[in-house]
């Protein structure tokens, strides 16, 4: 399938990072153009007494030609589709030709695409961090429950000082926060 820019020039290697491809179609008409006329002669097979003859037409030079494709305005197009070999040459054949059109992004569109990529990457990093946090959550909860139990034992025994209890509460907070 051919690729054209917005001016109608053919492109072989468009940069997809800097532009986009869109599918377009165009109504075209294929016409058989004769390059070499067919030449024939008659060969008499039988002659009759009343003057009648049976003849055979012998082709000396076969007709040769090519298909020419034009759009509806009559402009010749460089058609890259397939025209079947058995297509009749007598009448023009209407067809729809599909091709792609390459359009270069504007600076604003490139900035927007870069911003969307950055946002998608940031979201992927955030998702990975969240998944890692959730994988560690059961282990952290077990540690937090043990620390709360120890804190309760320390509080129940009058041997613990206020400083010891505050240090234990700070450690418990850090454990729950995942630090």
Image (cartoon, helix red, strand yellow):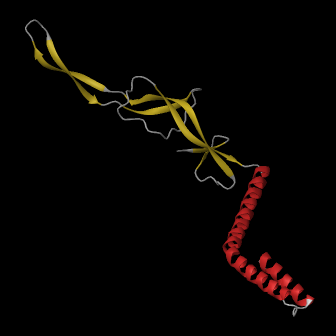
* Closest to the observer, 146 or 95: 146
Dividing the image into 4 quarters, which one contains the C terminus?
Answer: bottom right
Question: Measured from the top left, where is residue 62 in percent x and y?
Answer: 30, 31
For the point 58% across and 51% down, the residue is 12
Q: Which residue sits furthest top?
A: 50
Looking at the image, residue 51 lies above or below residue 61: above
- Which residue does the image show at 26% across and 29% down from the upper left? 60
Position of residue 98 measured from the top left corner of the image (x, y, whole percent): 54, 38
Quick check: 47 left or right of 146? left
Figure check: 110 above or below 127 = above
Q: Quadrant of residue 82?
A: top left
Instruction: Give the side of residue 112 with respect to residue 20, left or right.
Output: right
Q: How far across and how far down the image is residue 36, in percent?
A: 37, 30
Outermost residue, right side: 162
Q: Which residue appears farthest toward the bottom when viewing the image?
A: 159
Name the one closer to the observer, 103 or 128. 128
For residue 138, above or below residue 85: below
Q: Residue 141 occupies which quadrant of the picture?
A: bottom right
């Amino acid at each position: 399938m051919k690729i054209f820019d917005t001016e109608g020039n053919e492109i072989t290697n468009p940069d997809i990072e800097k532009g986009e491809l869109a599918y377009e179609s165009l109504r075209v008409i294929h016409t058989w153009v004769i390059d070499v006329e067919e030449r024939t002669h008659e060969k008499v097979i039988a002659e009759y007494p009343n003057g009648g003859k049976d003849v055979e037409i012998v082709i000396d030079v076969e007709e040769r030609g090519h298909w020419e494709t034009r759009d509806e305005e009559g402009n010749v197009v460089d058609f890259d589709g397939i025209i079947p070999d058995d297509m009749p040459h007598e009448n023009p054949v209407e067809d729809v030709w599909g091709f792609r059109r390459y359009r270069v992004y504007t600076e604003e569109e490139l900035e927007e695409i870069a911003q969307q990529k950055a946002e998608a990457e940031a979201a992927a990093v955030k998702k990975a961090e969240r998944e890692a946090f959730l994988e560690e959550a059961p282990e952290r909860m077990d540690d937090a429950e043990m620390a709360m139990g120890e804190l309760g034992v320390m509080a129940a025994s009058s041997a613990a000082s206020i400083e010891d209890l505050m240090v234990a509460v700070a450690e418990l907070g850090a454990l729950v926060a995942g630090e």
